[in-house]
Amino acid sequence: MKLQRFSQTALLPEAKNLLALCFLILTGVNILALILHLFVAYRINSVAAMKTTQVQLINGQTYYVAERDRFFRYPSVIQNFVKTWAELTFNWDNKIPGTNDTDSGIKVNSKRVPTSSYFASLLLEPNFGKASLPDIQRFPLYNGTINNNKISSCIKN
């Protein structure tokens, strides 16, 4: 008995063409993704290089802001700070600020200073604020019962 060899036909005769087609489609998709990534990177870079920035507030309003030096302050901000500091330092009304409780003062070294003066010293540089509290103690006005109300109406540059 003679054995015959059967020649097998390819399961998918055009398999080589299908594989090449899938490879080309995958390559095209990757190139398209690369182009999109480069476009997005360019847009992000152009937004980062802008001199002004848009800021959206909680209520939906949008403002343009520009970058400033970190030590820049508007004169009105400085005036408001100095006014607040002066009012806290020199207005002693025997009440803790923001409450109706009686102010017994805060003990610094051996004497007491008004709580509002202590809060005002926190507005300053830490070392300068601590150094200013003994000078405030030298004022004979504060003993825990005297009111000293001054109204700052005009603070100029």
Image (spheres, grey):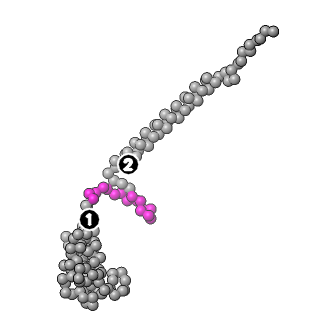
Query: Would residue 92 appear left or right of 26 to someone viewing this image?
Result: left
Q: Of marks 1 and 2, which one's residue comes earlier in the chain?
A: 2
Query: Residue at (41%, 43%) from the top-left corner?
Result: 41
Residue 56 in which image quadrant? bottom left
Q: Is residue 17 above or below residue 84?
A: above
Q: Is residue 99 above or below residue 25?
A: below
Query: Which secondary structure lies at badge 1?
Result: loop
Query: Residue at (43%, 39%) from the top-left corner?
Result: 38
Quarter occupied by the N terminus: top right
Whether residue 73 is visible here, answered yes or no, is yes
Query: Would residue 93 appear left or right of 19 to someone viewing this image?
Result: left
Magenta stretch holds residue 113: no
Question: Which of these two is toward me, 66 or 131?
Answer: 131
Which residue bears the numbered disc 1?
Answer: 74
Whether residue 154 is visible here, answered yes or no, is no
Query: Residue at (61%, 23%) from the top-left corner?
Result: 16
How crowded is the residue under tag 1: few (<14 C-alpha within 10 Å), some, or many (20+)? few
How crowded is the residue under tag 2: few (<14 C-alpha within 10 Å), some, or many (20+)? few
Going by the numbered disc 2, the residue's amino acid type is Val
Q: Give the magenta range.
A: 55-70
In the rendered image, residue 114, in percent from the top left (x then y), is placed at: 27, 82
Query: Residue at (23%, 86%) from the top-left corner?
Result: 142
Q: Residue at the far bottom: name it.
A: 145
Q: Is residue 79 above or below residue 6?
A: below
Q: CA distance from mark 1 to mark 2?
A: 27 Å
Residue 42 in which image quadrant? top left
Quarter occupied by the C terminus: bottom left
In the rendered image, residue 126, in percent from the top left (x then y), is placed at: 25, 69
Which residue bears the numbered disc 2?
Answer: 47
Query: Which secondary structure lies at badge 2?
Result: helix
Question: Which of these two is toward me, 133 or 55?
Answer: 133
